[in-house]
Amino acid sequence: QMVQGRGIGGSGGGEVDKQSLWDAGIDIFKKHTIAGRNSATSKWSVADVCVASILHQVKRERDGEAVDRSLLRSNIRIMCELPTLY
C-alpha cells in the first residue's frame, strides 16, 4: 500500500511504500536496540546484557547460591534467537 510522503522540510512529495517504511523501521530497531550499534542512548546491546546475565547466574551458582533457572533459560533462549534477528 502506498502513502503520501513528504520531503525534507515538509516540501516535495511522492508516494512511499508502507512496507519499505516498516522494513526501514525494523532495520533501525535491529541496529540500535538489538545490536547496540551507533546508539547514543545505550552502549549495551541485547546480546551484551544476556551474556552478562548468564555469566552472573553461573558465577552465583558456582558460589553456592540459588539461581533462577527460568531466568537463565530465558536468557539462553534469547541468545539462541538473536542470530535470526540480524
Image (spheres, grey):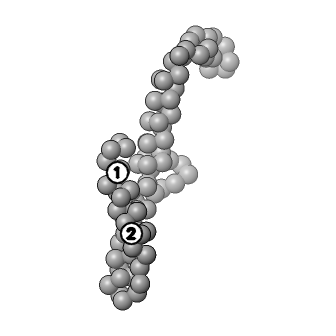
Closer to the camera in the image, 33 or 70: 70
Determine whether 1 is above or below 61 in the image. above
Q: Residue at x 48, y 41 (%)?
A: 29
Which quadrant of the view contains residue 9? top right
Along the line of sight, the residue nearer the viewer: 29 or 64 = 64
Q: Position of residue 75 (x, y in %)?
A: 39, 63
Check the image and report above or below for 15 versus 40: above
Label ID, residue 67 = none
Task: Name the residue type under label 1.
Answer: Glu
- Is residue 56 something that shows in the picture? no
Which residue does the image show at 48% across and 48% down from the upper left? 33
37 or 1, which is in the foreground?
1
**Residue 53 on image: x %, y %:** 41, 69
Q: Secondary structure at mark 1?
A: helix
- Residue identifier under label 2: 72
Whether residue 61 is visible to the viewer of this picture, yes or no, is yes
Secondary structure state at the residue bearing disc 2: helix
Tell which residue pokes out farthest to the front in this image.
Answer: 70
Label 1 sits on residue: 81
